Amino acid sequence: MKKSKTMIICFLLPDLIFFVFVFLYPICRTILMSFFKISGVTDAISKWTFVGMGNFTKLFETSLFMTSLWNIFRIWLIGGFIVMALALLFAVILTSGIRFKSFYRAAIYMPNVVSAVALATMWLQYVYNSRFGLFKTIFTALHLKGLAAIQWTDNAHKFWALLIAYCFGMVGYHMLIFASGIERISEEYFEAATLDGANKVKQFWYVTLPLIKGVFKTNITMWSVTSVGFFLWSQLFSTVTADTQTITPMVYMYTQVFGAGNSVTEHNAGMGAAVGVILSICVVIIFAVTNKLLKDDDLEF
């Protein structure tokens, strides 16, 4: 018994040390930093200036930060609805027994394999281009002059151009999660529903959806985590760091911590830590609400 305990400790100790120094310590340090004014992220604690809730108060009084929160909220809500709807649709189609399922699955997932930089460049140069872009070519061929004349990368349309491109790249990832959940459902349920006279729509509504509530929770949580970390796409679609159409909290955090070579925001690592704390709280709230609304403890399959 003693040998077993010793072996357990030997196996768990490296993981525990790794968890403390790689995860727990940075989290605790970030929370602590959010209550101080810090000129440099590597400054010693002796150089920190305690400001209490001052960083959080200043953030919510700063219009640029509030704009970044509004942008990320729209990305999370509108983009989430689009991505989840398309991902679920494709997952249902691909698990319905169609031919060449593996090919379609790989094709839809392909944007996730391509670098975000390359994907954004493709959209900017070959889809949104105002002279020979894909959208302009298609709309011109359909004689939709109003849509063909849209300048997708100007300030009036830049946010929606960014959102469309980002959603395009995320559908495949969430589709695979939905598909894995649907494939776990026993065929007996669908056979029983067919014998009871339920068509495909009713089978989807009364069989598939209730049995993938757990998958919905996973997808919403994963979407929330990736949304709050929205950074690279914002930078690629913007020529300036503080573009109000594309700025997100992560971009704002970057300018606070590293300065980003401009004077748009004050160089304060403590305020950048406060941004991280706010985003973490948002994810936790979303996770808690999702768990509350989507309960599947009473379902078995």
Image (cartoon, rainbow, N blue to C red):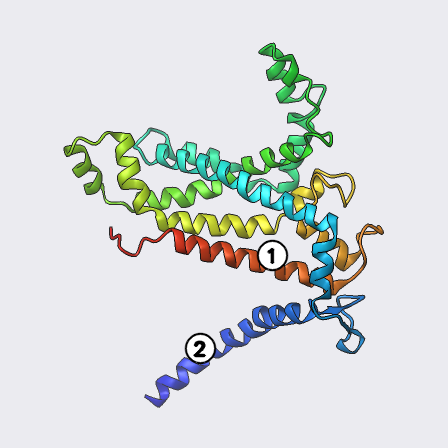
Front-most of 123 and 155? 155
Q: Quadrant of the N terminus?
A: bottom left
Looking at the picture, how far across and down is residue 159, in whole percent?
Answer: 66, 35
The disc placed on residue 193 is: none
Residue 142 picture location, percent across and down: 58, 11
Where on the picture, by quarter, is residue 145? top right
> According to the image, label 2 marks what residue?
11
User: Is any atom of residue 231 visible in this view?
Assistant: no
Residue found 57% across the figure and 68% down from its top: 23
Residue at 50% over, 76% down? 16
Sequence order check, earlier mark of 1 and 2:
2
Dot 2 amino acid type: Phe
- Mark 1 sits on what residue? 279
Locate residue 144: give its quadrant: top right
Callout 1 secondary element: helix
Crowd band around label 2 with a 10 angstrom C-alpha radius: few (<14), some (14–19), many (20+): few
The residue depicted at 71 percent of the width and 61 percent of the height is 57
